[in-house]
Amino acid sequence: MNELFPILDLFSNGDASPLLMILALALPILPNLWCIWHAYGHEFSTPAEKYGWMLAGVFVPVLGGVVYLLFGWRRTRGLADWAKPRKRK
């Protein structure tokens, strides 16, 4: 089984550091979290495109976030009006 999933080698050894285990589990999640957060705060050409990218980040683990990093973030039209920082007078 470890030949198919080399990441399991980290967990089979009792001497592996907990930080390394947390990093191994969290690293694949980060592109999806960034995809959801970035798409939520930016404008796209249509609302359907925005929600499509967000749904890809939620329902297609790892791959949805990586595809958004490669193609989706360039399709934004800037920050949404509500997400822009307020100017001080």
Image: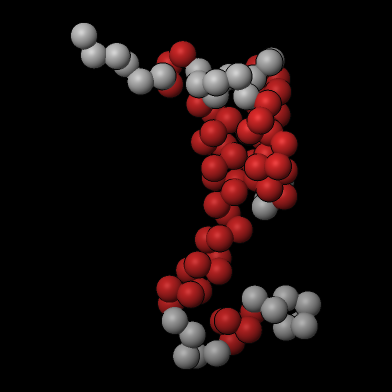
Where is residue 77? Give x, y as percent.
60, 19
Residue most extreme to the top: 89
- Res 87 → quadrant: top left
For the C terminus, which image quadrant? top left
Q: Is residue 17 left or right of residue 2?
A: left
Residue 29 locus on image (x, y percent): 58, 54
Is residue 56 something that shows in the picture?
no
Q: Residue at x 54, y 28 (%)?
A: 40
8 to 15, vertically: above or below: above
How many tags in the picture?
A: 0
Residue drawn 32% across and 16% down? 86
In-image side of 30 versus 88 (left or right): right
- For this view, does 84 lie left or right of residue 21? left
Q: How is the image coloured?
A: secondary structure
The answer to whether 75 is drawn above or below residue 15 in the figure is above
Q: Whole-percent x and y of residue 78?
A: 55, 21
Viewer-proximal residue among 33 and 45: 45
Q: Residue at x 65, y 76 (%)?
A: 7
Q: Quadrant of the N terminus?
A: bottom right
Q: Position of residue 42 (x, y in %)?
A: 55, 24
Q: Is residue 84 above or below residue 13?
A: above
Figure check: 77 above or below 62: above
